[in-house]
Amino acid sequence: GGLAPRRHRCSPTRPLRLHPSSVTAMAAFDAMSDAEVLNKVGSNELPVHALEKGLGDCWRAVRIRRAWLQQQEGLASPTAVDGVPHEGGIDYDAVHGACAEMVIGYIPLPVGVAGPLLLNGKTYHVPLATVEGALIASTRRGCKAITESGGASAAVLKQGMTRAPVLRFPSAMRAAAFAVWMHEPANLAVAQAEFGTTTRFGRLVSARVTVAGRYAYARFVCATGDAMGMNMVSKGVSAVLEKLQQSDFPDMSLLGLSGNMCCDKKAAAINWVEGRGYSVVVEATLPGEVVQNVLKTTVSAACELNIAKNLIGSAMAGAVGGFNAHASNIVTALYLACGQDAAQNVESSQCITLLEPANGGADLHVSVTMPSIEVGTVGGGTILRPQRACLEMLGVAGASPDAPGSNARELATVVAAAVLAGEISLLSALSAGHLMRAHLAHNRKPAGPPPADP
């Protein structure tokens, strides 16, 4: 909990663009002890959110911010801050300006692997970060069933990250005129050219406009290479709208760059029907002996449960893209391990799981179809070393030098295949009545005192 000696300075690969007076102030703060800097924070001479900028030392900023937090009213337990680790496990220079603000440390998560998983002729060991006992063990059992059956096959049906700004016009007729204009191929080409001035890797593919009175929602669909692409698309769409305001539609007002028809981090039928990110289908045929010996169930029992639970049950619940057993479990765990935007599990987990008897009922055909898997292998959390290591384990880290976009594309297929493994294992456990037994074995420990610090 005490203040410690200074460590290193912020990385020169992320230069701070400061006014000369700020440079002088930074030098003054740097010469102070941690306690003196803490006093400056308390008097608001150095805002607590600007410690990295004011000190030029990201690790020291975290350390002083922790001490500041322990002095604040409203903190139920000042000593609890000591339980949040902050040394040795993360590169704060990489985090700063990219991943998080007001940083006080990091949260360690257990990472396990599910595999081997044979997919499209290649073997993977899938990293999953989770605190749900039995999840990785169950997914690994599904991987075993798939691999022993000769593997799964996956295909990307389409790819396109979307952004749908909400635009206001003086009248509904002008909004309708904008929709007609935007849907003309020659005018789309104008928008594509303007979009292309903002990026080397992105490409505007299409744009469809939905009108509601004076409001128009233009859903731009863009190819984004190996990036998940939200920032890339937002920048390009902004340029397109500025161009149109200066030319054909000076009466158009941009109310918001996102008008909720994108649709990001919310369950929406438009993603389910039109897709967002990568739309993937994956399948496998499991011999009856694998179903019996590995999954411990029968073809008929698994198929009957899938219909009653994933199809009928989900329909009765009014699900939007939730025709599956627990796709979000695997998606979220893989996203956390691989530096993806975990909140995008909402739409990325939209999935329909289908089980059918094959070969006269002797074998089991399984598939999952996922229309909106949003992943990238560059940018965001993929710049952090542990998350990048997990991508390296899969062989998809960074941008592909030979085929731009192929790494993210491959990652999307791994996500879907891992979901398939998780689905068949859970459905088998449920149909055989083994679910609670597995959770008692893997997810329960006797209550005891909190673990001591290592």
Image: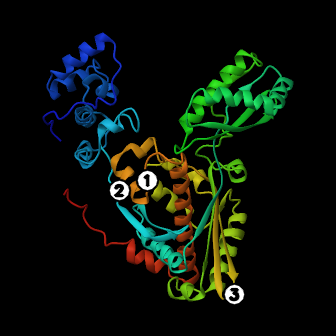
Q: Which residue is mark 2?
A: 109
Image quarter in which the N terminus is found: top left
Which of pointers 1 and 3 lies earlier in the amino acid sequence?
1
- Residue 19: horizontal and vertical position, in percent? 34, 13
45 on left or right of 274: left
Determine the secondary structure under disc 2. Answer: loop
> Is there any visible trace of residue 256 in the rendered image?
no
Q: Residue 35: x, y in percent?
A: 16, 27
Mark closest to the chain's N terminus, 3 or 2 = 2
Instruction: Categorize mark 3 by other alpha carbons within 10 Å: few (<14), some (14-19), many (20+).
Output: few
Residue found at the very far right of the displayed protein: 173
Residue 149 appears in the figure: yes
Q: Which mark is residue 336?
A: 1
User: In this rendering, which labeled residue sits more in front, label 1 or label 3?
Assistant: 3
Which residue is located at x 50 percent, y 82 percent? 434
Q: Position of residue 322 (x, y in %)?
A: 64, 60
- Look at discs 3 and 2 and give the one toward the viewer: 3
Is 281 rendered above or below residue 165? Answer: below
Q: Amino acid at mark 3?
A: Gly
- Horizontal side of 221 relative to 398 (left or right) equals right
Give the amino acid type for the residue marked by disc 2 in the picture.
Answer: Leu
Cβ–Cβ below 8 Å for labels 2 and 1? yes
Element under disc 1 = helix
Q: Is residue 242 left or right of residue 406?
A: right
Label 1 sits on what residue type? Answer: Leu
From the top left corner, tell me how far across and down residue 15 is, in percent: 33, 25
Pointer 3: what residue? 361
Which residue is the extreme one toward the top?
21
Q: Mark 2 Cα within 10 Å, few/some/many (few <14, many 20+)?
A: few
Looking at the image, is mark 2 or mark 1 earlier in the sequence?
A: 2
> What secondary structure is marked by label 3?
loop
Identify the residue at horizontal 66%, vertical 20% (top origin). 242
